[in-house]
Image (spheres, grey):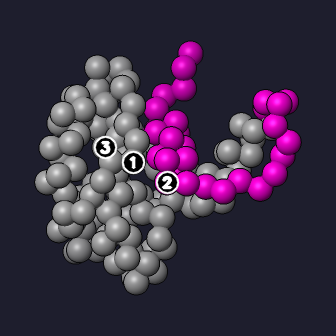
Amino acid sequence: MAVVYVARSAALTKWASDVGQGKHIFKLGVVADNDEAKVAIEAGWAGESDWRLIHSQEVPDLEEETVIERLMRKEKVIDPTYYPKLKGATGIFRITLTNVQNSLLVAKAMTADEPLTDVKVKPKDIAEYMIRNALPSPS
């Protein structure tokens, strides 16, 4: 089993906002187990050490490149060769909040119990959206 995780850095988010990338910047990755995810997050990426785990999920064995490519169909990945600040870190995405809100509204509409109201998106909602869209659909 592998673990897909989503992490976020406040310092990198501030930098991304300053360079016009927005404030919804998250890192998607795959490791062998939760312990490796914690070690990777503590080591950090893009020269930042304030990364924190937002959400993780166990999945069947997957390659990180495959997961990143699947999410790239929906969201914009920040190119590490264009921004030297990223120092070669892959899997850093700029998330469009509207896409997450629409996804949550559709899920809410599918359950007849709740009335359709505006959705306030939290970082965990974004992380779940990223993981859901990065994984192959169940067949």
Left or right, 39 with respect to 53, comes to: left
Q: Is 122 situated above or below 137?
A: below
* Residue 7: assigned label: none
Asked if residue 81 shows in the view, the reply is: no
* C-beta proximity under 8 Å, tags 3 and 1: no
- What percent of the width, then of the height, locates residue 51? 27, 58
Which residue is label 1 attached to? 54
- Residue 1 on the magenta segment: no
The 10 Å Cα crowd at callout 2, few under 14, some 14 to 19, many 20 or more, is some
Amino acid identity at mark 2: Pro
Quadrant (top left/top right/bottom left/bottom right) for the C terminus: top right
> For the point 71% across and 53% down, which residue is it?
119
Q: Secondary structure at mark 2?
A: helix
Question: What residue lies at 19% left-to-right and 63% top-to-bottom?
Answer: 49
Q: How many marks?
A: 3
| Magenta residues (range) | 110-139
The answer to the question of whether label 3 and label 2 lie on touching residues, with beta carbons closer than 8 A, is no
Q: Secondary structure at mark 3?
A: strand
Is 135 placed left or right of 41 in the picture?
right
